[in-house]
Image (cartoon, rainbow, N blue to C red):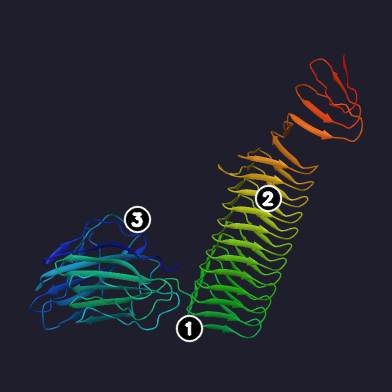
Amino acid sequence: MAVGTPVNHAASGAAASTHTTGSFTPQANSLLYAFVIAFGSTTVPADPTISDSLGGTWTAIHTAQLDPAANPRLKAKLFRRTIGAAPAAMTITVNGVSLTQIGVIATSVTGASTDVSNVASNGSTVGDPTPVLAAMAGTSAAIGWSGYGGGNQVTHPTGYTELTDVAIATSRRLCAAYDLSAPATSLDFVSTNATGLAIALEIKDAAAGTGISGSAAQTEAADTQSAAGKLALKAASTKTEAADTQSVAGVLPIKGAASQAVAADAMSAAGALRIAATAAQAVAADTVSATGFFTREAALAITEAGDEIAATGALLAAGSADIIEAGDDISGAGALAITAAIDIEAAGDELSAEAGLAISGAAQLADDDEALAASGALAISAAAEIADADDEAMGEAALAIAAAVDLADDDDTVLSAGTLAPLPGTATATIEEEGDSLSAIAGLAISASLSIAEDGDAVEIIAGGVAVPVVTPPERTAMVPAETRALAIAAEVRALAIPGETRSAKVAAEIRSAPVESEPRREAA
């Protein structure tokens, strides 16, 4: 498994020679790291010691010190303890001698190797400690812990995420930060404190495969980069020949860009495929796929027919997804979520997900036979626009549209096997061409109005396999050029205006009436 996100459990201290943290429960099957720092006034403190309420075994990883020949003098030590599958609540106690204050940071990490060979420390008499690690594997994370002779806030290293930044006593402070994806080797803690001492550690993946820290280039047909655990590319991945492949059974993260320039190139991962910048497919039949999930921070572009971006778990794009050639596919067996907009500009393009298709901006279908489909639910929060014949938006469970549904051409369809329900406060459902239909097997709910403008349009509800008739509007008016008679059946009244002779008849409770331009006659039967 990949290195998990570090969890900080304690960051505290005291103006004393001993300190016990509050109770906490570390992550199951993790490594628990403890950074202990002691502050002395006239001499550098002795190495601090550590124990816990469960009687666990702690292994020392690294020791560092800083003696600025003035108060305070610092001594830091990093420890590690293994946590099993059933962790229990615990406290940590740290002790020292020849000191005035002591503090501790406790951090647990899952998926971490016990290999701690890449560790570094640095002290600073101006409060800016910068430990520098050796080059790291592409699958590794890094954590930096630090302590300060001063109480001012600390700026954590560039590209890192802060775990804690806390004052533990008068003019004493602790700070820690981590980076899970291609971390920088130089951890530049910055502060205005008098002194600072930091220790940094490469957190190696316990099941690491292949790591590439620079770039991976494939320039000939059938080149391959693969790893059974995790394949990490720090900068860019470029494939320029047909049938090149990058694959991994675990996770394929790419921090820069992934470019496929020749037909049939492929990037795939059985766990997850993450691309931080852009993924560009410029030639037919290129593929980016992951059986777990596919996440992208920027934009997703498919520019040639037959390109595919697929995930059996979930497909998430934070920017936009554009499909501009016929036959392109973006699909996910779990869920397909796009936060901005999705445009389909060529016939036969598809966006689909077996569980759910969620689009928060707008969905546009501009050519014949395009489809937005989901076997679970299709939810569009803005507008769904179908502009050409035979376009479809469908969901087997429910189809929910928050704004408006427009069907502008013959045979367009909005269909749901469960319920077709525009959300409360919706506008209208409009059918403007012959043969258009709105249907639902369970029920059809439209909160505002329904307009049918052409012959052959239909609104149908099927409950229990039986068609429920739709009530005909109670009044209709027809204009005819010749003599006409009007009939009112049941409680229905029909009025007809004609240029010639008109007759009005009343049968039982029915009334027939017609104003005419010639001499009128009335007859009652």
Against 376, residue 187 (above or below) is: below
Percent x, y of residue 138: 45, 77
Tell me which corner region of the image, top left, top right, bottom left or bottom right, holds residue 315: bottom right
What residue is pinned by disc 1? 214
**Is 69 placed left or right of 79 in the picture?**
left
**Is 164 placed left or right of 362 in the picture?**
left
Picture residue at 19% right of the left edge, 78% below the top: 195
Q: Amino acid at mark 3?
A: Ala
Picture residue at 73% right of the left edge, 60% below the top: 367
Percent x, y of residue 342: 61, 61
For marks 1 and 2, the one nearer the N-term is 1
Say which mark, if any, is on residue 86.
3
Q: Amino acid at mark 1?
A: Gly
Label 2 crowd (10 A; few <14 / some 14-19 / many >=20): some
Q: CA distance from mark 1 to mark 2?
A: 50 Å
**Is 448 placed left or right of 6 in the picture?**
right
